[in-house]
Image (cartoon, rainbow, N blue to C red):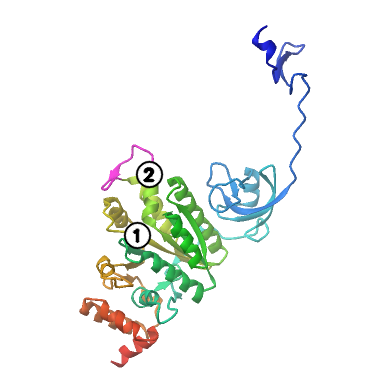
Amino acid sequence: MTTTDTIPRTAHRTRSRNGSRTAAKTSGVNGAARAPRPAAEPTTVSGLFDGAAKNAVIRGGGYLPGPKDVSVPPALVRDHGLRTGDVVDGTAQNGRLISVETVNGLPPGAPRPDFADLVPIHPTERLRLETGPAVLATRVIDLLAPIGKGQRGLIVAPPKAGKTMLLQAVANAITTNHPECHLMIVLVDERPEEVTDMRESVQAEVIASTFDRPATDHIAVTELAVERAKRLVELGHDVVMLIDSITRLGRAYNMTAPSGGRILTGGIDVRAVHPPKRVLGAARNLQGAGSLTILAAALVETGSKMDDNLFEEFKSTGNMELRLSRSLSEKRVFPAVDVTGSGTRREELLVDPAELPLLWKLRRALHDQGTVEPFLATLKGTGSNAELLLSLRNA
């Protein structure tokens, strides 16, 4: 007996009258036809549309690929004008979207502007961060580097300089003073416990890709978050995004860059420099629409030449910079803000004309002192920034 006599075949070929060969699928030894698979019941789905993926999908479990993802046919994308970052509600069957009910809470096809066509202008509406006399970090930012809606800022941070605590203070100030803003916090290549701490410390949309995930996930999460922010801005919303950190995002782009490119100082592929700049460049105040404010942490003095060179590439893109000082943090002085290296471009558009000369007077005094400790002591002794500036005017 041959092997083919003892092992049942699940499919055998037959020859038709015209000589062509056809395959007849059977199930089991009796050759009975396999029953057709019943169609699944349609289900409602809601999630972020990701058109940048290899195949367009609705992310059913957040910003990363997951088992709840639903594929989207190209016809639906075209007919409803879906854009990456849209929140789509619809009906799916067998893991495939079959109808669209709403896009960003509006009927499909509702008119909306395109982010790329909107006109960027300088920030003119201030984001006040001062929340109380004891929260010095946000009071210092208001005095030294004020922030407006649509700001593109860098928080230049050496290790252990209080970056995370500063970001949490800024996030809590935004939710307290500006509830009209949609706050997003993007954590790239971060420790899982830091992600948990951030989610428990602030009331915001925390989007994270931890260090145990591949670099491609770091990139995908950040890019989808930025696209989501753009869709909100198109609808007239003000969005504030905190990124920790743009340096680690740059490393991820460098790791995924194709081989064979020109290498810059520090081992940076020249093709890895532009994508993080594109992320930062999304921050803007838009005429006739909303605004996207991005404050991104840039890591320096890490011992990596790559990190220093990435910062050199990024620093020309921002219109606000807050520098943290390693020497102050080593002396346990917090917030460890470098008063001489921090500032905002065109701050006169944000600050009240009566307040502006007082801020300049304060900064001149800080430059003359050469140290921030007396200033922080004075700040602790006043109940508000207004009280501090009033004392300067009367001095």
Q: Is residue 330 above or below residue 68?
A: below
Q: x, y (%) of residue 94? A: 69, 42
Q: Quadrant of the C terminus?
A: bottom left
Residue at screen point 68% across, 16% down: 7
For mark 1, what is the residue? 298
Of the numbered discs in the image, which one, if any, rests on residue 255?
2
* Residue drawn where x is 55% and y is 67% of the image: 237
Which is more toward the observer, 69 or 211?
A: 211
Confirm or deny contact between disc 1 and disc 2 (CB under 8 A): no
Q: Secondary structure at mark 2?
A: helix
Q: Which residues are magenta?
A: 254-267
Locate residue 74: give its quadrant: top right
Label 1, label 2: how far apart the Cα atoms are = 18 Å
The residue located at (59%, 60%) in the rendering is 112
From the viewer's perspective, tell me whether residue 376 is left or right of residue 164: left
- In the orientation shown, which residue stands out farthest toward the bottom? 394
Residue 308: % across, % down: 28, 55
- The answer to whether 357 appears left or right of 24 in the picture is left
Three-letter amino acid code at disc 2?
Met
Q: Is residue 265 magenta?
A: yes
Amino acid of disc 1: Ala
Q: Is residue 289 visible?
A: no
Q: Is residue 32 in view from this perspective?
A: yes
Q: Is residue 74 left or right of residue 365?
A: right
User: Which is more N-terminal, label 2 or label 1?
Assistant: 2
> Dot 2: within a 10 Å radius of its alpha carbon, few (fewer than 14), some, or many (20 or more) residues?
some
Frontmost residue, 262 versus 113: 262
Q: Is residue 123 magenta?
A: no
